[in-house]
Image: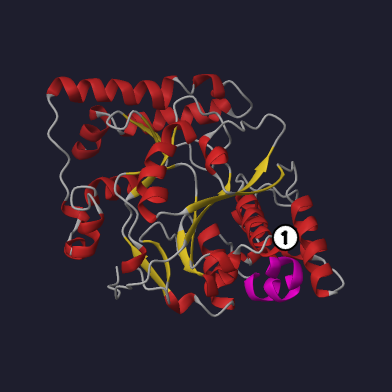
Amino acid sequence: MHPSRKSSKVERALVCVLAKTRAHELCFASFKRCVLDELNADLAVALTIDHDYDYANPFWQHAKYRWTAPDFADYGQGFDLAQRLTCAERDLAPADWRALLAVKGVWQGRIHSPDPQPSASSILIFCRWLLLHGLRQDGVLERYDRFIVTRSDFTWLSPHPPLSILDPHAIWVPEGENYGGINDRHLVASRRDIEDCLSMLNEIVLYPLELRQEMQHKTWNDEQFFAHHLSRRGVSDRIRSFPYVMYTARPLRDRSPTWSRGKYEPVAGHYIKYPAEYRIARAFATVIRDRSDWERGSWRSFDPDGFQEPQVSIFGRLSNGAQRFYFNHIVRLPSLIQPGGAALIGRKLRQLFKQSILYRRRVSVG
């Protein structure tokens, strides 16, 4: 975490939600209170939607700007669309961007390729381009000073950091969850930097051979690819971080495809997709309750690793354990009666055995 100087200017802010509006029934209330209202911001959505999209959801209803594209079965079609428009703007002949599929990693999930990936990461790359294209085409860039690019399935436990304490010359991301690169789940950028932050797909379709030469010797996850892109754009040295005060949640009834199904947490009453986010957000929620707590800055010296969960009675622990077992294992049984389900059941049984008292005793005796 890095200190920053305060700004006296009241900045115009646009919050941009990417890709999907999943978990809106769970997350929108905290999003509106802790982000939109706290920053006095407008809302934009850049989404890929299908024929049964729920237009009544509050993210869509509250959005001042909306940019959409089909939810492609093969997001290579979306990349082709972006390339046609990008090359037409620059009067360039299109390059073979699919040559970059030789670069391994989850970044190409949902693109039909020789090495299909069990992820949907290309949707985010496409939706960053969709957002940037909309901001440019509709003349929105000049209307705002700061852009907050985020996701709909964050539950906010504390208010968003006020822009007055976030240096406008820096690009801000949550601290942690970097996986060898830069966290790409949420960012705050000024008007001068937002195009660099959103232009990954432009680089892919315009300079695929250069990227392949630079990236061919390793396997890339989303965070590493994002970090590589920001380095190419010359802005990676201005990345700064603030603490996680939100976490990624999944409703009980959600069956949409996702990289991380998460674990059920009885205290929250829903699935937690990334436990580290949840633990840190709960810790910082004890010291950041409103804007004045951000401004006083005492959170800078706070150690979230020292956070102690409230004591729970024996009955409470038994109840929580039963709920975790039911939602993390029993509820998932129908999905296990599928090709590959037997292997998944075997892995689950081994995991449960290794967590058992019998196994721990055997290991300690051995």
Q: Secondary structure at mark 1?
A: helix
Foreground residue among 288 and 342:
288
Examine the structure image and report whether residue 167 is included in the region drawn in magenta. Answer: no
Q: Is residue 303 above or below residue 192?
A: above
Q: Position of residue 167 (x, y in %)?
A: 37, 73
Q: Is residue 332 above or below residue 132?
A: above
Q: Position of residue 263 (x, y in %)?
A: 39, 34
**Colour style of the rendered protein structure:** secondary structure
Residue 90 is left or right of residue 309, and the answer is right
Q: Position of residue 150 (x, y in %)?
A: 49, 53
Foreground residue among 277 and 315:
277
Tell me which segment is drawn in magenta.
202-216
Q: Is residue 334 above or below residue 308?
A: above
Q: Amino acid at mark 1?
A: Leu
Residue 51 is left or right of residue 254, and the answer is right
Residue 240 is left or right of residue 79, and the answer is left
Foreground residue among 123 and 28:
28
- Residue on which disc 1 sits: 101
Q: Which quadrant of the structure image shows residue 137?
A: bottom right
Q: Which quadrant of the structure image shows residue 299?
A: bottom left
Residue 287 is left or right of residue 151, and the answer is left
State whether residue 181 appears in this view: no
